[in-house]
Amino acid sequence: MNYNEVEILFAEDSMDDAALTIRALKKSGLSNKLFHVKDGEEALDFLYRRGAYADRSTALHLKLILLDLKMPKVNGMQVLEQVKADSQFHNIPVVILTSSKEDPDIKRCYDAGANSYIVKPVDSDNFFQTIKELSFYWMISNVPQE
């Protein structure tokens, strides 16, 4: 994959949830420029060109980061905090896509700079509709800050 074409970085440790999300994005026509990583550490490695991504070009055109909260190694909250604290990434919208409905998680994410917090619907039809609306808004309707 040409990493410079990546527009969505998707961090999700559940392969079932990842497959469902990617399928929903495909149905909305936006999966071809998505890169999936399995944990927060890999997301940070991708962003900072470390490890397996060390030779990735600096010309990355990310439009959106989708983050699960509860991931191994480095959790989604830690990734969110690092992204929003770094001037090279802080303008990239970060959408938390998680199963946690806990108020403290929601508040912490918004306080840390999350642009949206979406609880994964249990029902697959609702999930597909949610992902379709999410991708349409963040990839087509939203005007990013330059």
Image (spheres, rainbow, N blue to C red):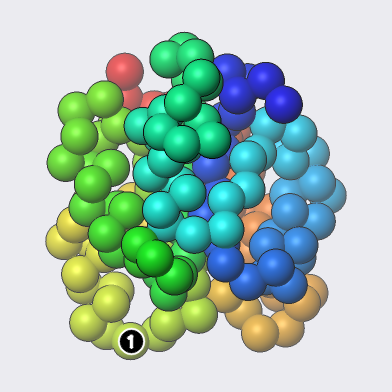
Residue at point 72% right, 83% down? 123
Q: Which secondary structure, mark 1?
A: loop
- Quarter holding the N terminus is top right
Q: Position of residue 97 (x, y in %)?
A: 50, 65
The 10 Å Cα crowd at callout 1, few under 14, some 14 to 19, many 20 or more, is few
Q: Position of residue 64 (x, y in %)?
A: 48, 39
Would residue 120 appear left or right of 132 to someone viewing this image? left
Residue 41 picture location, percent across and down: 41, 53
**Of 118 and 105, which appears nearest the observer?**
105
Q: Is residue 124 above or below residue 133?
A: below
Question: Is residue 86 shown left or right of residue 27?
Answer: left
Question: Is any part of residue 141 visible from this angle?
Answer: no
Is 72 placed above or below 51 here? below
Q: Is residue 134 visible?
A: yes
Q: How many marks?
A: 1
Most extreme residue toward the front is: 51
Residue at (45% x, 47% y) in the render: 43
| Residue at x-position 77% and y-position 77% | 124
Report whether 66 appears left or right of 83.
right
Q: Determine which quarter of the picture holds residue 85.
A: top left
The residue pinned by badge 1 equals 102
For residue 47, above or below residue 125: above
**Residue 106 position within the rendered picture, expressed as x and y whole percent measured from the top left:** 29, 74
Q: Amino acid at mark 1?
A: Glu
Is the residue 38 above or below the residue 62 in the image?
Answer: below
Q: Nearer the viewer, residue 52 or 80?
A: 52
Q: Give the quarter of the figure containing the C terminus.
A: top left
Residue beneath the point at 54% across and 35% down: 52
